[in-house]
Amino acid sequence: MLTSRPLESWGGPSYRRVLALVRAIVPAFCAISLIYLVNLSIEQFDLQRQLLFSWSILIILIATFKWQLIKRPLWRFVFILLNGLIALNYLIWRSTESLIYTGPLDFLAMALLFLAELYALTVHFLGMFVNFWPMRNRPAPPPTDTTAYPSVDVLIPTYNEDEDIIRITAIAATQMDYPKEKLRVYICDDGGTVEKRTQQDSRAAAAAWERHYRLRRMAKELGVGYITRETNRSAKAGNLNHALRHTDGELVLILDCDHVPTRDLLSRTVGYFLLNPKLFLVQTPHFFINPTPIEKNVVDIGNPNAENDMFYREIHRSMDFWNSSFFCGSAAVLRRKHLMEVGGIQGKTITEDAETALKLHAKGYDSAYVDRPMVCGLSPENYSDYMVQRTRWAQGMTQLFMMSNPLLSKGLRWHQRLCYFNACFHWFFGFARLMFYIAPALFLLFGLKIYHASISQILIYSLPYVISTFVLIDFFYGRTREPFFSELYESVQAMFLIPAVVSAIFYPHKPTFKVTPKRQTLTDESLHPWSVIFLVAILINVISIVAGIYKWFTYPLLRDTLLVTGVWCLYNLFLLMISLGAFWERKQIRYYHRVKTQEKAIVTIPRLHMEVEAEVVDISLTGMAIRFRSPCSPNRGEQVVIQVSDGWGHRYEFDAILLRIARHGQQYACGVELVLDAAQYANAVRFVYGDSNRWLGKWGASSKSRNTLKMLLVFFMQGLRAITLSMNMLLKKGGNMLWDLIQHAGFNLIKTLGTRSR
């Protein structure tokens, strides 16, 4: 922990001192570095002095990182700024010495590659800025006098999700530790609107009526409110705004219908609003109990969600320092008064959450981030659903950039402009990633001169920059992200996000909100048809490497460039093979996900008149896996009683049935199904989802611990497997598979353009 936010408000004296230091150091260091490097370039120092300059800084960086000196604030500043110096040195060399005109086609390819590098460097510098000083919030408990508590409305928007998902979240919301007279929970149903119930499709209308009655009955049964509306205009934003007009709580807690809150969510967030009247938002992390398809398909990481951790465990803490923590759509408490000043939840873009936060920050209001997981949600189960979610994020942030450019937004402070710009600009990575994939092949196959550098220049400028980048990434995100995972996540999204981003650039008002499907099941393993595009890319890189080997012997004068592009091609090939493994969809048949844990329990077996101590290995809402030692053998199908306790010391007792039994001597491993009536169901929700200490333990346990070389070997082998499977599918389906790819990969840009032109 580097610093703590003062209790009185964002912008307290400690924060202002740090910010003043940052404002003084960063511009001065950048100016001095730029003057020095430009002077270095003008004087054309010999390569030996340049080599000494670059590698000396790199050695200092590595030593600082290895000896953990970066844990001290001053060394953290030095580490980041020296990293920026290496990147700046590379940028000046790249801009002044390596851009050589040799022909129109060469120039076009060279310019595209340089633009991709400029994008990467911009993101690199923005990342250094955003992550300059991560913060942790100190607790801000509400007062002991409950009459001073503000009233809270809990809004649970839903569209087409299963009733069970909504029920769990609504029950958990009613169980939060907060004065009941101050807490009101509402199910905001956009799937049972009047528009849905009166549509021309009789089957769909009947389904909407049935949903309307079911959810209304469920709300009455649980003692919560039910709100629906006339139309579905403005999707989630419109649904929430309609609910805001029909409620009056001072604070509003927004929960996606699959985001189950813990009991302490309000008690750990409401206090901040009492301490700072300018505070409009307290955002908490989104914690997922199931892995994303990428994690599940590639390395079967299991829970918790590691991709999500990088944003919520690292980046958002750093954004909090800059008073730029923004609304993420759920797991957030907002002040109604400030929210209604901007007309409620914004709806110009399909990322209504970030757009709303931008408006309120521009009004001069503050935000805070509490880095403790206090909701439990569901990640998309398969690659198609994953891309639906990521496409919505990419298009929404592109819309925000095009229609409300943060760099030009009035009212934002300079550091907020940069933080919001970074959040938008990140989603253009597809263009750069595509260029990095094809650049070496353009030279090896077509002879286009796109990167003019000798081996000595690569060693002096490029290699220190690349190494320092990986060191910095490991420093910023090493607790939550394995090596090369950022490249993997970008790789599997890049090709398919480009059309969506291009469409949002040209037609920023066109994208519509699409709900991410929840709780999908897969009965068999299969290979996603989109994998064929990666198979083609792998083939191109293999051909490029073969062409490079041939040219090595026939064109000895080009060996410097051939070596650079050949190594580049090998890296691309490795990354593509890893990415291909992400398209192998693994079987998913569980309706409720199991969470691994290690908790004590007491199992009573009535038939044997015996109680034994047991260990809970994993849990879900309807079952658990337990281990215990017993001199007598239990029977499959036998009814038992299980006593457990949560992190708050509350005891629970559940009737259960032993479904699976594995015996090793007197050791038993059993799969248990809980027998739940209405009261026991509520207790199960409280036990499984109500304890944030459980999620906090899982969050901390997700820090990286794998051997890097072993992990990369696993990646490589899974990539080989995916190639074999892709080849088999391609041979069987042929042209049909290619056409399926075109239909499903999101390349509807031509259709969109054609419609617009008419």
Image: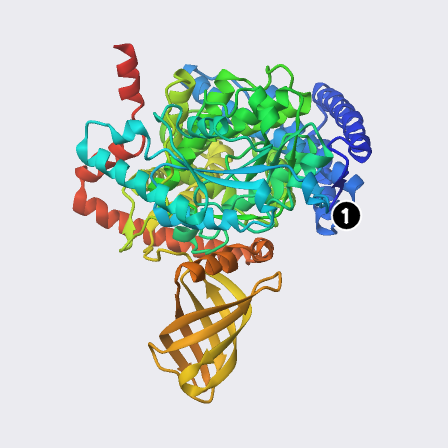
Report the front residue among 56 and 457: 56
Q: Nearer the viewer, residue 428 or 248?
A: 248
Furthest-bottom residue in this view: 631
- Measuring 25% from the left and 10% from the top, which residue is drawn there? 758
Query: Is 758 displayed left or right of 59 in the figure?
Result: left
Residue placed under numbered mark 1 in the picture: 69
Foreground: 67 or 225?
225
Q: Nearer the viewer, residue 519 or 178?
A: 178
Instruction: Answer yes or no: is residue 542 visible.
Output: no
Measuring from the top left, give residue 489's x and y in whole percent.
46, 41
Would you identify the image quadrant in which residue 266 lies?
Answer: top right
Q: Is residue 661 above or below residue 19?
A: below
Q: Residues within 10 Å of mark 1 (few under 14, many from 20)?
A: some
Residue 732 appears in the rendering = yes
Tag count? 1
User: Which residue is located at x 42 percent, y 82 percent?
Assistant: 606
Q: Residue furthest top?
A: 758
Query: Looking at the picture, how far across and down is residue 733, in whole percent?
Result: 18, 43
Residue 8 picture location, percent across and down: 77, 35
Does 599 sit above or below residue 182?
Answer: below
Q: Is residue 405 above or below residue 498?
A: above
Left or right of 51, for residue 753: left
Callout 1: helix, strand or loop? Answer: helix
Left or right: 320 as drawn, with respect to 610: right
Residue visible at 46% across and 89% down in the picture: 631
Callout 1, which amino acid?
Answer: Leu
Visual colour scheme: rainbow
Q: Residue 430's spot in the image, x, y percent? A: 44, 30
